[in-house]
Image: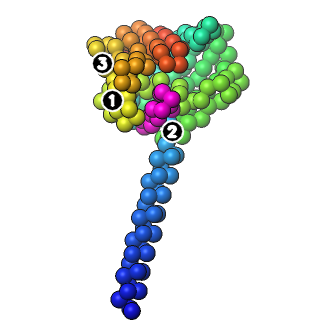
Amino acid sequence: MRKNKAVLLTISVMLLLFCFCSCVSLSKKENEPFAYLTNTSRFILLPTGAIEKSMDMAQCISASYQDNNFLMIAWVKADETAVEMTLLNEMGTNIGELSYRGRTIAFSSQVFPDLIRPEYIIADFQLCFYDTSLLTQALKNCGLVMEINGTAKRILKGKELIYEIERNLEAIRLVNHLRRYTYTLEGDFS
């Protein structure tokens, strides 16, 4: 009888530990910031340390979505510890601020209060400026493939083209074919 109680107690403790460990790993994964690059491809944002090259610079952003065109300036400071963006309109007025530190994203804007989830801005930023090998693995983890041809990247789900990113020393052009938006970043990307 004592032996059976000891076995039951041991099994109970093991099951409790298993459940606890499963819940801890699940909640940790749920707390990681992400963006859906397709309707089913959940891209877990990379840590700030995965940036290819630190930057502290102004970028001119021209964007188009459906029939709308936007022009703004972004002051971008990005390194291994944080990504910080200050968005300015053509007159130099602050229209938004974004910060990605650790695994926390903060975004405030009077102009885009509920229109844009900041995780999507960070995801596009990472596709343009983060380490290619780490991006390739993160994209693979969510069912996407990145093809690289010189200074061009293509991101696909199966045979469907999702993103095209062209880069040179003065500009980066990102086209999201699925969501139908395009933007060009102009700056000194040497």
Marks 3 and 2, the one that precedes in the sequence: 2
Q: In the displayed image of the protein, which residue is found farthest to the left?
A: 150
Query: What is the magenta range?
Result: 35-47
Give SS at disc 3: strand
Q: CA–CA distance between discs 3 and 2? A: 26 Å
The crowd level at tag 1 (other Cα within 10 Å; few <14, some 14-19, many 20+) is: some
Whether residue 185 is visible here, answered yes or no, is no
Q: Tell me the number on the disc at residue 136.
A: 1
Residue drawn 47% across the image and 24% down it: 125
Residue drawn 39% across the image and 25% down it: 157
The crowd level at tag 3 (other Cα within 10 Å; few <14, some 14-19, many 20+) is: few
Q: Tell me the number on the disc at residue 33.
A: 2
Q: In the displayed image of the protein, which residue is found farthest to the bottom?
A: 1
Q: CA–CA distance between discs 3 and 1? A: 10 Å
Residue drawn 30% across the image and 30% down it: 133
Q: Quadrant of the N terminus?
A: bottom left
Q: Amino acid at mark 3?
A: Ile
Q: Nearer the viewer, residue 70 or 38?
A: 38
